[in-house]
Image (spheres, rainbow, N blue to C red):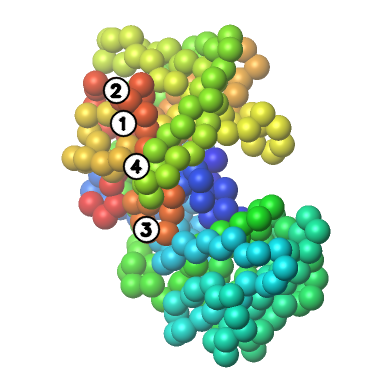
Amino acid sequence: MRHLLSSSLALALLSLGCAAPESGDAAGAGPGTPEAEDGDGEWAAELAAHREEIHGKFVSYGPSPIAGTQRLSAEPPASRPVYLTREDRTFAFADAPVPAAALSLAKEGSGWTWEKRGDEVSCTAGEEPAESGSTVSGDVSFDVSGIHLGCHLGADEITCIVYDPERPEKKAFEHLVYYPPDRSYAVPARLVRIAEPDEVEMLTSLGRKSTFVRYARIHFQLEGREQTLTAYKSTYAGEWSDSLFVPFRDTTSGQETYGAGRYIDLVEPEGEALILDFNRAYNPLCNYSPAFNCPIPPRENRLAVAIRAGEKTYPH
């Protein structure tokens, strides 16, 4: 969930709003190899590689979270196309072919036919280029004269996030800020699956609701006390079916870390044992841009301890 930082990053994050790198320490150092105090070189190297990878995606041209400027949506009627217009670096949907239109999308069966209307427009579906006049669906991206749009073409609705490499925050970005790596926050834990998982709705940063399945309880010890967090799933099928989403707040939230809380993503283990590594806790994407729609951690995942590991609020 967290790092779907491909051309479809924003799409998966339109509803989940996950985030990015881990590079630097509490003093704000740039990406590099963290030195674990306990000398666990393999753990430190894996954490450093993870941070470096995400840092690269923050400074990339395409769907860098720090470049997000707009979130657009449209529900065009089946009988006629919708037009994506551009005025300077601002985009909007229109129901008529105005001169500022960069492209159009029209519902065709189970997909959408897109047509180029501007001079510098290209489309990518998956990892393959899609020519003007072709039918696409699901997660696609458009590049319009140097501005990147990540779009999800659903059954009836189109949702896009605009990424502008000239956004001042993107041009000024250097790195995210993290607590120093601390092996004591990578804790052994036990995953207890819920016998009858139920659906829950989480309020989001845009005042909407995202639906998840309350899947399991994670039991662990921290500061000598028993702690519990709930793990959620967004799907039981497909590529992300083994992903567990763990949103949480702790006593650093709103002080040293992002006020709405942070997230951890886990791969579901075959049994019960797992390592819950708070050094990989990251901020929702809405910390970097109002273009994202981020689930707010529910009350059941509020910890009465300070988790001084992972990402701090940005900027700090």
How far is mark 4 from mark 3, CA to CA? 19 Å
Give the image location of residue 299, x and y in percent.
Answer: 33, 25
Front tag of 2 and 4: 2
The tag earlier along the polypeptide, 2 or 4, is 2
Front tag of 4 and 3: 3
Query: Which residue in the structure is indicated by mark 1?
Result: 249
Residue at 80 percent of width and 71 percent of height: 134
Query: Which residue in the structure is indicated by mark 3?
Result: 290
How far is mark 2 from mark 3, CA to CA? 26 Å
Instruction: For the residues labelled 2 and 4, say whether their Cβ atoms are less than 8 Å apart.
Output: no
On-image quarter of the N terminus: top right
The tag earlier along the polypeptide, 1 or 2, is 1
Secondary structure of residue under mark 1: loop
**Which of the 4 quarters of the picture holds residue 315?**
bottom left
Instruction: For the residues labelled 4 and 1, say whether their Cβ atoms are less than 8 Å apart.
Output: no
Instruction: For the residues labelled 1 and 2, say whether their Cβ atoms are less than 8 Å apart.
Output: yes
Instruction: For the residues labelled 3 and 1, say whether their Cβ atoms are less than 8 Å apart.
Output: no
**Which of the 4 quarters of the picture holds residue 261?**
top left
Tell me, yes or no, if residue 231 can be seen here: yes
Amino acid on which disc 4 is placed: Glu
Query: Which residue in the structure is indicated by mark 2?
Result: 303
Residue at 21 percent of width and 40 percent of height: 254
The tag earlier along the polypeptide, 4 or 1, is 1
Residue at 18 percent of width and 40 percent of height: 255
Q: Residues within 10 Å of mark 4 (few under 14, many from 20)?
A: many
User: Which numbered dot is residue 311?
Assistant: 4
How far is mark 4 from mark 1, CA to CA? 13 Å
Amino acid on which disc 1 is placed: Arg
